[in-house]
Image (cartoon, rainbow, N blue to C red):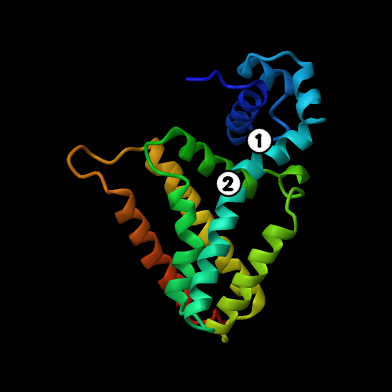
Amino acid sequence: MAPIDTRTQILDAAEHLFAERGFRGTSVRAITDRAGANLAAVGYHFGSKAELLTAVIRRVVDPITAAQGAGLDRLLAETADPPVAGLVEAFTGPLFDDARAGDESGARTSRLIVAIFGDPAEEMRSWTGPAEEAVRDRYQAAFQRALPGLSPDELWFRIRGILAVAAVDRVEAHNQPPPAGCPPTASAARHWAITFLAAAMSAPPTTA
C-alpha cells in the first residue's frame, strides 16, 4: 500500500478535528500534530486554515452534491414534475451512501455536516459555490412544484431538516451501535429515513 501523502494526511486530520472541535476550536498546530506534518505544511498546501477548511468540506460535500444532481437529472428525465418521495430519495440517498454506519470515514462525513449546521464560525458557511447553489435551487424549484402550498421559507426549512436528520442519524448509527442480533442494514436505515422524511415534507403547510 502506497504511503499517504502529506496533503491527504492534513485533510484527514483537519476533517476529524473540525468536526470534533469546530473551526475556532481547532488550531493549525493541532492539525499538523495529528497529521504528523510540520507547521508550515498547512500554508504550503492550502494557504490558510480557512482555505484548509474549504478543502476539507469540498472533499466531503462535492461527491454528495454531484450525486444529488445526478439523481435529480434521472427523475426529470422521467417526468417534469417528480413526486415528493422521489425527490426526497434523490436528495437524501447520497447522504446515506457516503456516510455508512460502522465506517469511520462515513462517521466523519456526518459529524462534519452536523458541525457545518451548528458551528457559529462564518467560515463554516462561506465555502459554498455555484455548484451547491445550482443543486439547491433546482431541488427547491422541484419541491415547490410538488408542494405548491408551502411558502418558500417553510419549504427551505424542511429541506434543511432533511440534511439535519440524515446527518444526525448517520452519526448516531456510528456512535451507538444497535443491540446485538438486530442491527439494521444500511439499506433499511436509508429506506426508513426516506419514508419518514417524505411524510414530513408532505405534511400540510403550518398555520399561524
**Which secondary structure lies at badge 1?**
loop
Horizontal placement of 58 versus 94: left or right? right
Which label belongs to residue 37?
A: none
Q: Which residue is mark 1?
A: 22
In screen coordinates, is 25 left or right of 186? Answer: right
* Alpha carbon separation for disc pair 1 and 2: 11 Å
Residue closer to the observer: 168 or 137: 137
Q: In front of the other: label 1 or label 2? A: 2
Q: Is residue 37 above or below residue 27?
A: above
- Total marks drawn? 2
Q: Measuring 34% from the left and 54% from the top, which residue is drawn there?
A: 189
Q: Position of residue 208 (x, y in %)?
A: 59, 81
Q: Identity of the amino acid at label 1?
A: Gly
Residue at image coords 79%, 17%: 40
* Residue 148 locus on image (x, y percent): 57, 86
First in sequence: mark 1 vs mark 2: 1
Question: Amino acid type of disc 2?
Answer: Ile
Q: Quadrant of residue 20?
A: top right
Disc 2, SS: helix
Mark 1 residue crowding within 10 angstroms, few (<14) / some (14–19) / many (20+): many
According to the image, label 2 marks what residue? 113
Question: In this rendering, does residue 186 appear at all?
Answer: yes
Depth order, front residue of 99/4: 4
Is residue 147 in view?
Answer: no
Q: Residues within 10 Å of mark 2 (few under 14, many from 20)?
A: many
Residue located 47% across and 40% down the image: 106
Q: Residue furthest bottom?
A: 149
User: Mark 1 touching mark 2, by CB under 8 A?
Assistant: no
Q: Position of residue 39 (x, y in %)?
A: 76, 16
